Image (spheres, helix red, strand yellow):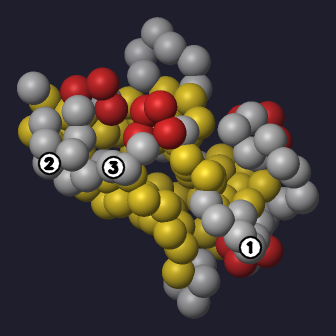
Amino acid sequence: QVQLVESGGGLVQAGGSLRLSCAASGRTISNSYMGWFRQAPGKEREFVATVRRSGPSTYNTDSVKGRFTVSRDNAKNTLYLQMNSLKPEDTAVYYCAMGASYFSDVERASRYDYWGQGTQVTVSS
């Protein structure tokens, strides 16, 4: 049984930083596509970033370019999202997602098989 547990969310002032973590169990993240999505109130779930089994990571460049960095620690089976220069528009629930198969359209939420429960990030102005 795969479980994804996010942590690290909270309240931060604009310009601040947070690091989200996603601890996985039941499947190794090194053999998976690991992504971050977010959903603000009244909006659709939005792709943030993905790290593939191999090769470069992919980011939603319009929203987070140069500010967010996705990484993973295979030994800890944990995914991270370092968020810097946070803006009020980054306020959302952030979800970790795992894709077990190969796919190229990493921005599509339906491609991912498992999801965490989400962690709230609130950025005040």
Q: Position of residue 117 (x, y in %)?
A: 54, 44
What residue sits 42% from the left and 59% below the top? 69
Of the pair 35 and 2, the residue shown nearer to us: 35
Mark before the other along the chain sequence, 1 or 2: 2
Mark 1 or 2: the one toward you = 1
Q: Amino acid at mark 1?
A: Ser
Of the pair 66 and 124, the residue shown nearer to us: 66
| Residue 67 image label | 3
Few, some or many residues within 10 Å of mark 3 (<14, 14–19, 20+): few
| Residue 54 image label | 1
The quarter holding residue 92 reads top left
Disc 3 and disc 2: Cα gap in Å? 11 Å
Disc 1 and disc 2: Cα gap in Å? 30 Å
Q: Amino acid at mark 2?
A: Gly
Q: Position of residue 76 (x, y in %)?
A: 53, 84
Label 2, on which residue?
16
Mark 3 or 2: the one toward you = 3
The quarter of the picture where the N terminus appears is: bottom right
What residue sits 22% from the left and 27% below the top? 88
